[in-house]
Image: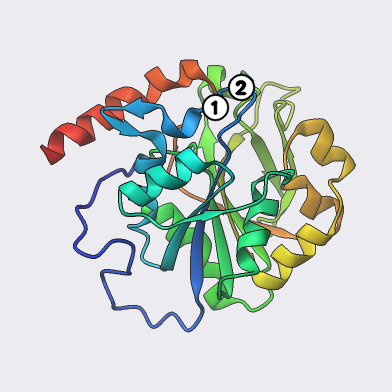
């Protein structure tokens, strides 16, 4: 897994300055303080820094992003982001999911493509963000992208907090599920984990927000199914980034060694 921390001279401002993007990519980290599985998760500290700090640090290294925002409905998160030098935006409390929250942000900020990086991915690789942005520059028909990585660990495959995805021959998503898909009836098959990151064209994001939460979305608790149920294709990019999500308190111990190691390098 590619993972590094970059000490920035100019926070989140496309340090490299070498890409003529033509399209404007805006990174948004939606953060909800009152998670049912892990209340207060964004501000839980690992190696002396809150989880939202770690996520923000990684996102700011993506070369495609012109701007990075944290979208939250919580004053404590808002102030924490401001304190470490990030840009935070207060949003409503009524949003059904993170994409709906980003839809509100898109009403006030300019951007051709909005990139949703979930706030519980403190080890997300900047390269993964760039990989899901790249298709928009190559194909005007692309509406939504996301990422997947192959998993072989049976514990991860059986974990309902780790979402699985199956794709067609064009690498478009067929389905996402917390269950094991595809079912390996004859003992063979490959399973892919969905990496919790999306990029949407502005009009596709606006369309999502006009749709009501869909039936399968509510059954699985997976917002991306709203796109599929309404006929919007999702391009799935295979990446090498096996990012670890912090879904529940017990997940902290899985990411702690990685983050403590990176923190020690900064000292």
- Residue at image mark 2: 37
Q: Horizontal and vertical percent for residue 232? A: 79, 61
Image quadrant for the N terminus? Answer: top left
Image quadrant for the C terminus? Answer: top left
Task: Please say if the residues under marks 1 and 2 sit with CB atoms less than 8 Å apart.
Answer: yes
Query: Which residue occupies the extreme left position in the image?
Result: 267
- Say if 247 sits above or below 96 in the image: above
- Residue at image mark 1: 247
- Quadrant of residue 182 within the rendered picture: top right
From the viewer's perspective, is the residue at label 1 or at label 2 nearer? Answer: 2
Residue 77 appears anywhere in the view: yes
Q: Horizontal and vertical percent for residue 19? A: 35, 78
Q: Label 2's element?
A: loop
Residue name at image x 61 percent, y 62 percent: 105
Q: Horizontal and vertical percent for residue 155? A: 54, 17
Residue name at image x 63 percent, y 19 percent: 158
Residue name at image x 61 percent, y 22 percent: 37
Q: Is residue 190 left or right of residue 257?
A: right
Q: Horizontal and vertical percent for residue 58? A: 35, 49
């Amino acid at each position: 897994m590619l993972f590094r921390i970059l000490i920035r001279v100019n926070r989140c401002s496309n340090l490299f300055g070498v890409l003529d993007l033509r399209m404007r990519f805006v990174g948004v980290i939606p953060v909800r303080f009152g998670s049912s599985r892990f209340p207060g998760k964004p501000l839980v500290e690992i190696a002396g820094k809150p989880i939202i700090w770690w996520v923000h640090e990684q996102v700011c290294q993506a070369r495609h992003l012109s701007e990075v925002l944290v979208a939250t409905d919580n004053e404590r998160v808002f102030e924490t982001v401001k304190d470490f030098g990030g840009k935070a935006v207060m949003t409503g409390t009524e949003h059904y999911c993170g994409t709906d929250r980003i839809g509100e942000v898109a009403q006030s900020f300019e951007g051709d493509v909005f990139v949703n990086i979930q706030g519980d991915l403190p080890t997300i690789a900047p390269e993964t963000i760039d990989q899901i942005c790249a298709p928009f520059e190559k194909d005007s028909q692309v509406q939504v992208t996301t990422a997947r990585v192959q998993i072989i660990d049976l514990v991860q495959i059986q974990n309902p907090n780790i979402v699985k995805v199956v794709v067609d021959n064009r690498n478009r998503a067929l389905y996402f599920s917390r269950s094991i898909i595809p079912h390996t009836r004859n003992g063979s098959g490959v399973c892919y984990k969905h990496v919790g990151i999306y990029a949407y064209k502005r009009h596709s994001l606006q369309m999502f927000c006009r749709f009501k939460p869909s039936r399968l979305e509510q059954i699985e608790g997976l917002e991306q199914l709203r796109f599929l149920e309404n006929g919007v294709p999702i391009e799935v990019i295979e990446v090498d980034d096996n990012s670890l999500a912090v879904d529940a308190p017990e997940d902290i111990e899985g990411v702690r060694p990685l983050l403590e190691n990176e923190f020690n390098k900064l000292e």
